[in-house]
Image: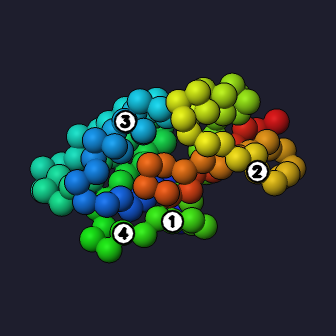
Amino acid sequence: MGIVGLDHVQLAMPKGEEDRARAFYCGVLGMEEIEKPPHLAVSGGCWFERAGVHVHLGVEQDFRPAKKAHPALLVDDLAAFAASLESAGVEFAPGKPLEGYVRGDITDPFGNRIELMQRL
């Protein structure tokens, strides 16, 4: 009885920017796009998945990027991943120390914060 897991995280995006979302989440982060059910696809946005992690981007009419609230994605080699992100033009900012992790932040093309974490 109670919470057994996390299904997905939803971030907001501006209307009509699905191609930019695909370029970043698929092309840069290496996620795969998952087809939205037809009754939900009519509202726009995109869904992405990799290694059991689901990120949904939903269209928000009065869009404002999430600067504080964020998903934290686990990676296996943060230094190598950060270097590949920077070579793709994505700025990586090292994070503050947290016992058991090395971490840092990036933003998606819409300014939403995404934390990247590697367990030590």
**Residue at the farthest bottom position:** 62
Q: Earlier in the sequence, mark 1 or mark 2?
A: 1
Which x, y percent locates residue 101? 80, 44
Using the numbered discs, state the Cα–Cα distance from disc 3 to disc 2 in whole angstroms: 25 Å
Crowd rating for badge 4 (residues with CA inside 10 Å; few <14, some 14–19, many 20+): few
Residue 113 seen in render: yes
Indicate which disc, 4 or 3, sits on the residue closer to the N terminus: 3
Report crowding for label 1: few under 14, some 14 to 19, many 20 or more residues within 10 A (C-alpha). some
Q: Which residue is mark 3?
A: 23
* Residue 78 drawn at (x, y percent): 70, 33
Asked which quadrant contains residue 82, the reply is: top right
- On residue 66, the disc is 1
Quick one: label 4 or label 2, which is nearer the N terminus?
Answer: 4
Q: Looking at the rendering, which quadrant does residue 90 occupy?
A: top right
Within 10 Å of disc 3 (Cα), the crowding (few <14, some 14-19, many 20+) is: few
Give the residue drawn at x 54%, y 51%: 107
The tally of labels here is: 4
The quadrant of the image that shows the C terminus is: top right
What distance separates the C-alpha of mark 4 from that of mark 3?
19 Å
Q: Position of residue 112 (x, y in %)?
A: 50, 58
Gap between marks 4 and 2 measured at Cα? 26 Å
Element marked by disc 2? loop
* Location of residue 41 with respect to 82 vertically, above or below: below
Asked which secondary structure carries label 4, the reply is loop
Front-lying residue, 87 or 6: 87
Please give left or right for residue 91 compared with residue 65 in the image.
right
Q: Are marks 3 and 2 in contact (CB under 8 Å)?
A: no
What residue is at 46 percent from the left and 65 percent from the top?
65
| Disc marking residue 95 | 2
Q: Which residue was labeled with disc 4?
A: 63
Kind of residue indicated by mark 4: Phe
